[in-house]
Amino acid sequence: MMRRNPRWPIHAALIVVSVIMLVPFYWVLKTSLSGENIYAYPPSIIPKSPNLFYYVDVWYSIPFARYFLNSVAVSAIAVAANVVFNAMAGYALTRSFAGKGLVILLFLSCMMVPFQATIIPAYLITGKLGLLDSWLGLALPQCSTIICIFVFKASFEAVPPSLIDAARIDGLSEWGIIWRVMMPLAKSAVATNVILSFIWSWNNFLWPLIMTRTPEMQTLPLGLARFLSYQEDTTGALYAFCIMVLAPGLLLFLMAQKEFIQGLTSGATKG
Amino acid sequence: MYDDAPVRRGWQRFLLNRFVLVPAAIAVVTLAWNLYVATHDHGLVSGRVVDAVGKPVADATVTLWVFNFVTFEEKLHVKTGADGSFRFTDNPSHKIELSAEKPGVGRSARLPVRLYFRAQDTALTEPITLSRPG
């Protein structure tokens, strides 16, 4: 018996869209293996004599392992700090207190100030704290983001107040309510925080450029700039570098995609 | 319990999941690769030099060129033996070129050799051919 509404047109459309989305990634991977000129015409779909030597070139041209370690450490600090601080701030904004409207207004207005405008105060503060040229200093301006605070606030507001009252009657402190009641119900917000803070931290270029003083503390985006200044013929090696930078994020997402998707689709309704 | 999934003990839950197994697999591969590198990084590069008709060339000079940022620079020289074979023992690089010449016989074009790590031991599968007048 035939379905009244066949699904194949939807699947066909989704396959076409997926292919269009994946072509640039495939092209980067192909070029990293073959070093072919990306403007060559007619383009070759299958890489000619693929090899891994461009990856070897990247590895030895710059201290890749050190940059990678720096990026991982800074991103880990930023992700952990975002989840903790944003959850605390988001929870505070769901409570009633004097001047709450003003605080929210202040947060919203601060979102309109670009980071480039605050980079000098941020540098001076980091310098006064003695954190220049350190992992913590690299992560410091990204330890809390206003957008993610509002993500937590929205998620916490969906939790029934009776549940919070019950937890309070059972003797939980405000701290306990956040970590034992709110956070398990706010997986979507946690997932959003983790993804966004990781991407922002991993891709950050300007702040590491300003505040690092030694090559040993540079992160991967700075390494890419340094690499481009070293190499003359960069086609294959540049794309290999891009794959090496992308790979950890992709691996993280592939490992955790079930949790991310669950978190993004379940959220506060899960009891 | 309504869940059909087998019940796992505490340590199994912590260890037998993809967040542990995938990094562990990567760590094992990395360790194995590093062991391989540590046992194969003596800088040995060996091969043969032949003339245009494929006869071994004795006493030819083989030059090893090492990539240095934007260009290749001459690094080492060895002479071939009676059977045309040569052997470098301290190649420091992963990106090299080899050339050979013998006055009166000819000279070769530079042969690019790519290695997977610095000083990787390698033996050329194809001989270096002296084909131009020397």
Image (spheres, coloured by chain):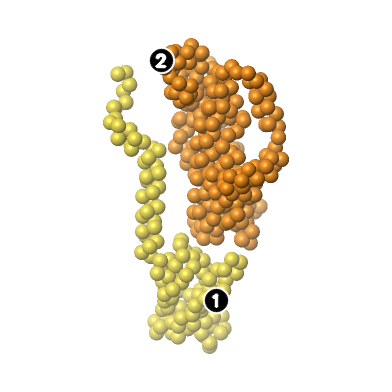
Chain colours: A orange, B yellow
Residue density around tag 1, few if under 14, some if 14–19, many if 20 or more, within 10 Å:
few
Q: Position of residue A233 (x, y in %)?
A: 62, 60
Q: Residue at x 65, y 20 (%)?
A: A99
Q: Residue at x 36, y 55 (%)?
A: B32
The residue that mark 2 highlights is A170
Q: CA distance from mark 2 to mark 1?
A: 79 Å
Looking at the picture, tell me which residue is in the foreground, A137 or A4.
Answer: A137
Give the answer, above or below, for where A191 lies relative to A61: above
The amino acid type found where label 2 is placed reads Asp
Extreme-bottom residue of the structure: B104
For the N terminus of chain B, the image quarter is top left
Q: Position of residue A137 (x, y in %)?
A: 57, 45
The amino acid type found where label 1 is placed reads Glu
Extreme-top residue of the structure: A162
| Nearer to us: label 2 or label 1 | 2
Q: Residue at x 32, y 26 (%)?
A: B5
Looking at the picture, tell me which residue is in the foreground, A253 or B96.
Answer: A253
Looking at the picture, tell me which residue is in the foreground, B92 or A164.
Answer: A164
Q: Position of residue A23 (x, y in %)?
A: 58, 42
Q: Secondary structure at mark 1?
A: strand
Q: Residue at x 38, y 51 (%)?
A: B29
Q: Position of residue B30 (x, y in %)?
A: 40, 52
Q: Which mark is residue B74?
A: 1
Give the answer, above or below, for where B14 lies relative to B34: above
Residue density around tag 2, few if under 14, some if 14–19, many if 20 or more, within 10 Å:
few
Name which quarter of the figure residue B86 lies in: bottom left
Q: Chain of mark 2?
A: A
